[in-house]
Image: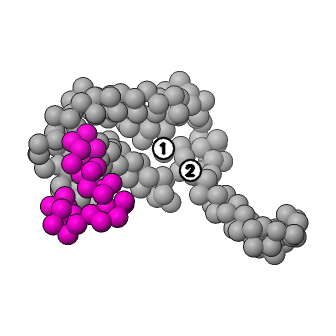
Amino acid sequence: MAEFLESYGAENRLLKSILFDLKTKEFVAGTKALGLVSKLITCPLWTLLENPKFSIIYMNDKYLELILFLDDSSKNIQSCMRGELLPFGLDTYIERDSIFDALLQSDIYDDTVYMMLQVLLPAICKMSKRLFQDHLPGGKPHNLNDEIKQKVKAAPKTSCYAESVFGQLNCILRMKPSTTTLASALCS
């Protein structure tokens, strides 16, 4: 891409900025590190969260698996960079596309990517432990009885629906600013 921009000519500020970023080793390595985090952690977790077959109670085990994966990956960064470690074992869904293949290929930036992942993975692990503390062993909804599991089976795992409703309400209020919240809620 840098060769293309150099031959084509980076005439405007955006293209000049992109060309500068492509020539900066740390920016390219950071992109690869964040790409690995996205493909190996974020996307598989989001796929589980969006799957209607699984309830919120099922996620307790998955959050624990994620924490163990992050801890293991922090200690075995090379294996993580090669895609040998998966957060949810065989249940991990990873879209194995050209981007994923490119992220797993060894290149000149791997030493810098390694250093970045040495910082990122433990930080994500620490943050995840804090965020998921209620879902980990010893947390509030861990080891629930069958009656409570049945009650929470249909509970949503994300707030996507609520966010979309409030997004629609916000859109209506922006289009018709003099409309009251109650009137716009009745229109929806």
Q: Which residue is mark 2?
A: 157
In the image, the segment drawn in magenta is 1-28
Residue drawn at point x = 38 percent, y = 37 percent: 66
Residue drawn at point x = 70 percent, y = 60 percent: 166
Q: Position of residue 115 (x, y in %)?
A: 24, 30
Q: Position of residue 14 (x, y in %)?
A: 36, 60
Q: Is residue 112 left or right of residue 174?
A: left
Q: Is residue 170 left or right of residue 181?
A: left
Q: Is residue 98 among what the camera can see?
A: no
Q: Main secondary structure of the magenta part?
A: helix
Residue drawn at point x = 31 percent, y = 61 percent: 15
Residue type at the position of mark 1: Met
Residue drawn at point x = 56 percent, y = 31 percent: 134
Sequence-earlier tag: 2 or 1:
1
Q: Quadrant of residue 175?
A: bottom right
Q: In terms of secondary structure, where does tag 2 sit?
A: loop
- Choose between 69 and 115: the one closer to the eye: 115
Q: In terms of secondary structure, where does tag 1 sit?
A: helix
Q: Is residue 144 left or right of residue 122?
A: right
Q: Is residue 87 among what the camera can see?
A: yes
Q: Which residue is mark 1?
A: 59
The label shown at residue 23 is: none
- Choose between 57 and 33: the one closer to the eye: 33
Residue type at the position of mark 2: Lys
Q: Quadrant of residue 25?
A: top left
* Quarter of the rendering occupied by the N terminus: bottom left
Q: Is residue 51 left or right of residue 162?
A: left
Q: CA distance from mark 2 to mark 1?
A: 8 Å
Q: Position of residue 151 (x, y in %)?
A: 66, 48
